[in-house]
Image (spheres, rainbow, N blue to C red):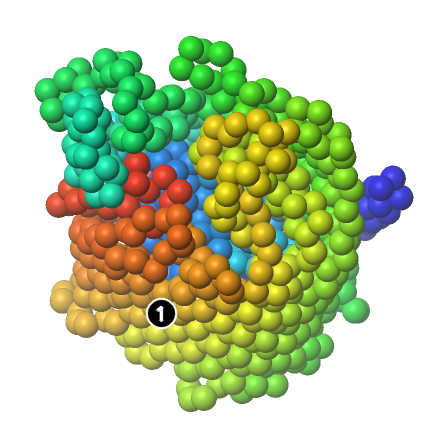
Amino acid sequence: MSRLFSLRAGCALSVLCAAPAAFAQAPDPQAPDQAYHDNRADIVVTALIPRRQGDILSGTTVLTGDKLTQQLRTTIGETLARQPGVSATSFGPNASRPILRGFQGERVRILTDGIGSFDVSNTSVDHAVAINPLTADRIEILRGPAALLYGSSAIGGVVNVIDSRIPRRVPDEPVHVEGLATYGSAANERTVSGEIEAPLAENFVVHLDGSWSKSDDLRTGGYILSKPQRALAAQSDDAEIREDGMWKGKLPNTAAETWEVAGGFAYIGDGGNLGVSVWHTENRYGVPSRIDVTEEHDHDHEGEEHGHEEEEGHSHEDVTLSMRQTRADLRGEVATGGGFLDSIRLRAGWADYQHQEIEPTGEVGTTFKNQSMESRLEFIQAKRGGWDGAFGAQFFTRRFQADGEEKFLPKNETNQLGVFTLQSLDLGDTRLEAGARYEHTDLKADPDADLFVDGRQRSFNALSGSLGISQAIMPGWRAGLNLSRSERAPSAEELFARGNHAGTQAFELGNPDFGKERSWGVEGTLRGGGEGYSISLAAFHNWFDGYIYDAIVDDSVCQAANGGAELEFPCFAYAQADARYYGFEAEASVKLAQVGGYAINVDGVADYVRAHIKGNGPAPRIPPLRLLGGVEARGDRLSARAEIEHAFAQERIADYETATDAYTLVNASLSFKPFAGNDRTTLMLSANNIFDVEARRHASVLKDFAPLAGRDIRVTARFSL
């Protein structure tokens, strides 16, 4: 690996050494950063070559401005959960990761400005993502084949959170200040964040930001336990268990407190930029516990909804996670002055992550440590007629270690080197696009006597590619078709897991002999619009060979791997089989009328996924069909919106799952811009789940024990000076 590091360092050094000369060059009017500076919401920088949203063949979503403010929550999963093709893991209110097209975990990459989050959220759904949406300027979601340019683990898609911690522009004013404050009633949530940018000289900018959020236990709508769990409780001879089955109100052990501070510095010249940032995050949050309704146990607690004191003496374990991460980032870009290359971009980051799982006694049960580094070097080609493109290399390393009684993975290391290219040809009405990525992955697990692991090392070579075409079929309308072939190396968790995992209530058993996961995919898109309306449609189908999934098996399988010892939890073993995923996303908006200074708009979203594992039946945790529609009156300074979201029942389930009931949420919001000419200062009042219904996301492992928030009145103030 030393040669890889040397190669990578050499590439980075050559870029930085070239920077002073490149700064003297005149900027290209179409350079990526300048497109970003234009603040056009339809420019997607995650597409490697920044493009207008309508020109990208795959499904895309961009959240920025008022739309982002309206959807903003303390987790990235809940912030994005109402976007087309997106659901969330919803492991309580504090650990929620996006699910794209039914894919989660290792098949979705969560990025910050193009590189990874450097946490362990892919290891378990109870581990929070170490990216704070409160600091985001914009969030981009890229689905389909184009996402594979960010790694073979992005077959489901990419979520890219873009902030200004490394400044992108020199402020016009002596000091630029932005701030955000939010109160949410469902969890008594109090959130504040702010940032300051100031020019130090003609081309130098310094940035500081910080945020703090604190919430109490989440108040839910309806019962805490689902119908199947309430039915089990009702059959118990234990009166305390029967009372637990009727628990309503607040979801125990879901309070949280998070703070973050960051500083950045950048040189921004005519021909390029170079900047760094350093930030530190601490997050302490409770994990909702499963109430055991199948066994007799002693209870001293009694719920507020049935006349008892709340939060005393729960018989189930109330585990608290205490997470901290320190991270450093680098971003640079130089304009080459034309010729074959237009610009060269470097992005790199390093982080030291740790979280402790704290038992109710205050003792630390398990400690997870993760050190990661990722760098990405991109060469953007100069546009020649209708041809443009980009190519580059990416290096990633991860060292993971868990210690304590709930350790379910041995100490392991992952090293990955990838090279990629994207080439595009614009023939006017017809556009062609081809992408390819080669990846070499080394995974190594150390011997671990506690887990009966002798140590193992695996290497994989994966090749992925895509071909796409889009055709103008009439003015303002384009149809597109993508074909992709992808390969993914198994993750360390899928190969080496072997132990009890309290977060998922499972004994997890990997298979170190797994082969690569391969798939073919096809995606069709249709986008168009005209005066006062726009429509976007996408349909996809993926065929997997060697699809990796977890399924419940006889306990004897895990006992044999565990030295014959009894298991604390059911045995879930990873396996490989053929699988199929298919579905669609649809999004539309229509301007109905203009009433005075207000445009009356209606919009709608629909998405659906169906997944089947050969020989095993439906894939687990697949979101059901969902419809969302809204009506909005939008003026220059005052806007009002009402919307309805309906998720259908999910009864197509894996053997060990329970069905999930349908739910309908009604939401409304009112936003006001108090200062004429200042679009970034907004006051917003919103009411979510107005009728306080009981709602559960089928994709959540914890959905039978942790429903979504009940009625939530939110007040948000966002300002810019």
Camera-side residue of 627 and 636: 627
Q: Nearer the viewer, residue 421 or 19?
A: 421
Q: Position of residue 518 (x, y in %)?
A: 64, 64
Residue 116 lies left or right of residue 44; in this view the side is right
Residue occupying image coordinates x 43% and y 72%? 538
Frontmost residue, 372 versus 56: 372
Q: Residue at x 55, y 45 (%)?
A: 573
Q: Does any portion of residue 408 appear in the rendered image?
A: no
Dot 1: element: strand
Question: Hey, which quadrant is residue 342 in on the image?
Answer: bottom right
The answer to whether residue 157 shows anywhere in this view is yes
Indicate the position of residue 199 as horizontal and vertical percent values: 57, 36
- Which quadrant, please, contains the C terminus? top left
Quadrant in the rendering for residue 426 = bottom right
| Residue type, numbered disc 1 | Ala
82 to 497, vertically: above or below: below
Residue 576: horizontal and vertical position, in percent? 60, 56
